């Protein structure tokens, strides 16, 4: 019994529910369209020449190319990990394109230079790139300076391998904030990139992170100077469009002393029969008293109802609370992807630092999710909090895997973990795999886990009040995830509530 | 004479291997309040669940007409939208869903299936405020997750609050008095009484006469062993209270 009082269901199986699930239609993926645009692509395959090709396309300095090549050499000696609770055929890394860019776009530029087809794509995705449009809602303050509403969002749009446009850059630059594509940062701010790139997720961290270090194509770079509170939400929308193309984005966020930034990330892809690989690396660095809030709504294509197609999402996300009293908070909503392998983590290095992880992971159809977090307590008086809500329906498998560890010197480390799983139907699975290690006797780690089902009684009660089955499931699931939803920025909260309904369509009968 | 609101004809219902209802006949006209009394296990709650359309019940014979239409052909949510409301004996907890959120979802779902537009927030708030004051429901309760940690009295008030807002034609009150102290019983009964009207029919299921002191029925039916064994006016409830169910059981046996 959870402290939400969800009653455990009687054990008998509702045949009808199972049949409905069998007839499940996850083909309703809303973002499954394809943009017809001419692309500049690297030939299929992966060798040092591919990496030189990418580096040349990005007009990178020699040090960057050397870094990539070093990573590639290490990667060749590594073995693909198999410890996650996911099953998939072996990936042929030679059968992929590692670079695809809309023709004629070598980097972000002003909006009027962007291919209108691309702008239409983002419009279809519900992402406004036109600053004009957004600025129409901007107020002038006393000094004639434009002050964006809190609802405004600066967007970096990444299409396949390149960032196509970054909005609000000038506005942000006034506060000294750098928000641009990582490719541009490599060229324009080499000292910052060299100082921080790979400092949180080392090149040799793991198989996919090393691969990413060799072939990463684009992503966002954020730098918040000392004492600055970023005046608007920063966000990146990732879109995979091309066939047989992997997306390897790299994001680096640096929050200097006493600064604050809230960053949102959204992902979609067209519906395709083949599986596509997405192996990103995200590194966050928070210095003294800085705070980074990182929110993700991941809605990659999950595959069709038979489990065909869909994105393989193998992602390494890690934040380093490097300074004292710094704070990093991850909030994620995982609904898409055929396979999710993702553990946004916090290294609590600075004394008094705090890490948070709030997660909603929904799996339906044949999706497989193995996700969780790591909270590594190194500094004194560090604290962390993990709230994970897994919802499994259809034939999916949903695993929470989390590590909480306390270093010898980390006196007074505190962690609270709560993992709740909700099962819909009886052909899905939910698993919780916590790893808790403490090397300091003053540490206090708490772990709570519950598993429940949506009960027939709850369903009947809702139906009796006039809700349809789908409305009832969406309502109950939204209630189940409520304490995570509250941590999402407003822009994402409403979207997420709807997304939960869509993701679970047809999951009961 | 106009069509009765609810006609139950020779209803036989089975749960797994056991026959629970063995030929129930009931006719409820528009605007009437009927009480069904019977001891535990006589099939009263089964009747309420069958009317609302819960699974797990097999209808082996008979029919139910709601405003002349076949109720058994309708899904539970269709019945709700058509105006059938069941106040549960044991209201179900919906964790994380604020009572207010649930009320809005239910009202809009019913409006949607009747082809009406969604309520605006001010309209909704006004309706909730009115209904809440009728039942002495505080704002704080509306913010809490539905039925989670509610006292017995709060749960029943929340049920009647939903009934008031959804404005059904047929109200089935299943043991609404259970779990209520005298004061709460009074508040809930008064709330129900205010909802009585010429276009609304109520089926009040109880095994104590005390509820019927507050909600005075037009017709009383005595239920025993899956059948209606006696029908009369409100005085029948008093007779039953005095004599106990045993006499009526004997009649059934005879």
Image (cartoon, rainbow, N blue to C red):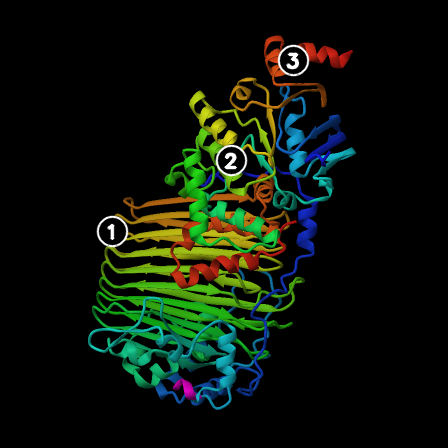
Q: In what element is the residue under mark 2? A: helix
In the image, taking residue A1 as reference, residue B237 lies left or right, namely right
Q: Are marks 3 and 1 in contact (CB under 8 Å)?
A: no
Whole-percent x, y for residue A234 in the image: 36, 71
Q: Which residue bears the numbered disc 2?
A: B159
Who's the residue at 53% across and 68% down the image?
A300
Q: Residue at x 38, y 40 (%)?
A: B139
Q: Quadrant of residue B253?
A: top right
Q: Which residues are magenta?
A: A106-112
Q: CA distance from mark 3 to mark 1?
A: 69 Å
Label 1: how many Cα within 10 Å (few below 14, some 14–19, many 20+): many
Circle 3 sits on which residue? B245
Task: Find out whether the residues at labels 1 and 2 contact each other: C-beta distance under 8 Å.
Answer: no
Taking the spot 66% from the left edge, 49% from the top edge, the residue there is A509
Relative to A154, say whether B75 is above or below: above
Q: Position of residue A164 (x, y in %)?
A: 44, 82
Label 3 element class: loop
């Amino acid at each position: 019994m959870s402290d939400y009082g969800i009653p455990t269901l009687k054990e008998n199986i509702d045949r009808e529910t199972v049949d409905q699930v069998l007839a499940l239609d996850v083909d309703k993926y809303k973002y499954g369209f394809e943009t017809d645009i001419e692309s500049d692509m690297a030939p299929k395959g992966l060798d040092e020449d591919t990496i030189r090709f990418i580096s040349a396309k990005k007009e990178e300095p020699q040090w960057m190319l050397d870094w990539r090549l070093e990573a590639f050499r290490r990667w060749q000696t590594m073995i693909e990990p198999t410890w996650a609770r996911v099953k998939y055929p072996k990936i042929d890394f030679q059968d992929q394109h590692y670079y695809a860019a809309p023709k004629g776009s070598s980097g972000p530029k002003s909006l009027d230079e962007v291919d209108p087809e691309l702008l239409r794509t983002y419009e279809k995705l519900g992402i406004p790139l036109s600053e004009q449009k957004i600025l129409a809602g901007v107020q002038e303050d006393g000094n004639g300076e434009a002050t964006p509403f809190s609802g405004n969002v600066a967007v970096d749009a990444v299409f396949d391998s390149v960032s196509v446009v970054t909005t609000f850059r000038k506005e942000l630059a006034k506060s000294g904030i750098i928000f641009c594509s990582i490719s541009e940062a490599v060229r324009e701010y080499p000292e910052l990139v060299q100082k921080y790139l790979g400092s949180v997720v080392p090149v040799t961290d793991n198989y996919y992170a090393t691969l990413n270090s060799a072939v990463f194509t684009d992503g966002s770079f954020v730098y918040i100077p000392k004492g600055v509170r970023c005046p608007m939400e920063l966000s990146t929308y990732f879109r995979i469009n091309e066939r047989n193309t992997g997306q390897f984005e790299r994001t680096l966020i640096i929050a200097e002393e006493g600064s604050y930034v809230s960053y949102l990330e959204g992902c979609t892809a067209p519906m395709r029969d083949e599986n596509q690989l997405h192996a990103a690396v995200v590194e966050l660095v928070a210095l003294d008293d800085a705070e980074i809030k990182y929110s993700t709504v991941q809605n990659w294509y999950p595959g069709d109802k038979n489990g065909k197609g869909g994105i393989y999402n193998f992602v390494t996300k890690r934040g380093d609370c490097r300074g004292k009293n710094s704070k990093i908070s991850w909030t994620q909503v995982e609904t898409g992807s055929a396979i999710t392998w993702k553990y946004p983590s916090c290294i609590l290095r600075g004394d008094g630092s705090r890490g948070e992880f709030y997660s909603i992971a929904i799996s339906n159809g044949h999706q497989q999710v193995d996700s969780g977090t790591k909270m590594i307590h190194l500094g004194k008086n560090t604290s962390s909090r993990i709230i994970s809500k897994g919802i499994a329906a259809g034939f999916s498998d949903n695993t929470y895997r989390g590590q909480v560890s306390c270093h010898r010197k980390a006196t007074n480390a505190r962690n609270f973990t709560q993992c709740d799983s909700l099962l819909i139907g009886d052909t899905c699975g939910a698993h919780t795999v916590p790893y808790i290690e403490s090397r300091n006797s003053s540490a206090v780690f708490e772990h709570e886990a519950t598993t429940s089902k949506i009960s027939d009684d709850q369903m009947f009660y809702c139906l009796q009040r006039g809700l349809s089955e789908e409305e009832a499931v969406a309502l109950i699931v939204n209630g189940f995830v409520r304490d995570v939803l509250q941590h999402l920025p407003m822009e994402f909260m409403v979207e997420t509530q709807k997304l939960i309904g869509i993701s679970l369509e047809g999951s009961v009968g | 004479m106009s069509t009765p609101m609810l006609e139950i004809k020779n209803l036989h219902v089975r749960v797994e291997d056991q026959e629970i209802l063995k030929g129930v006949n009931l006719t409820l006209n528009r605007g009437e309040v009927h009480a069904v009394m019977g001891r535990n296990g006589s099939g009263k709650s089964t009747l309420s669940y069958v009317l609302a359309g819960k699974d797990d019940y097999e209808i082996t014979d008979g029919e139910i007409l709601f405003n002349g239409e076949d109720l058994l052909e309708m899904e539970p949510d269709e019945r709700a939208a058509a105006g059938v409301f069941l106040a549960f004996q044991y209201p179900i907890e919906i964790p994380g869903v604020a009572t207010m959120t649930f009320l809005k979802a239910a009202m809009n779902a019913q409006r949607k299936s009747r082809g009406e537009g969604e309520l605006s927030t001010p309209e909704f708030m006004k309706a909730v405020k009115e209904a809440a004051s009728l039942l002495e429901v505080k704002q704080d309760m509306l913010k809490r997750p539905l039925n989670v940690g509610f006292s017995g009295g709060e749960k029943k008030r929340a049920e009647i609050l939903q009934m008031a807002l959804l404005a059904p034609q047929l109200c089935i009150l299943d043991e609404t008095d259970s779990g209520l102290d005298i004061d709460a019983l009074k508040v809930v009964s008064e709330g129900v009484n205010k909802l009585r009207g010429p276009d609304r029919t109520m089926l009040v299921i109880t095994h104590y006469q005390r509820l019927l002191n507050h909600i005075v029925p037009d017709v009383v039916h005595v239920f025993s062993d899956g059948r209606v064994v006696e029908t009369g006016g409100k005085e029948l409830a008093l007779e039953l209270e005095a004599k106990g169910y045993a006499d009526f059981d004997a009649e059934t046996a005879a």
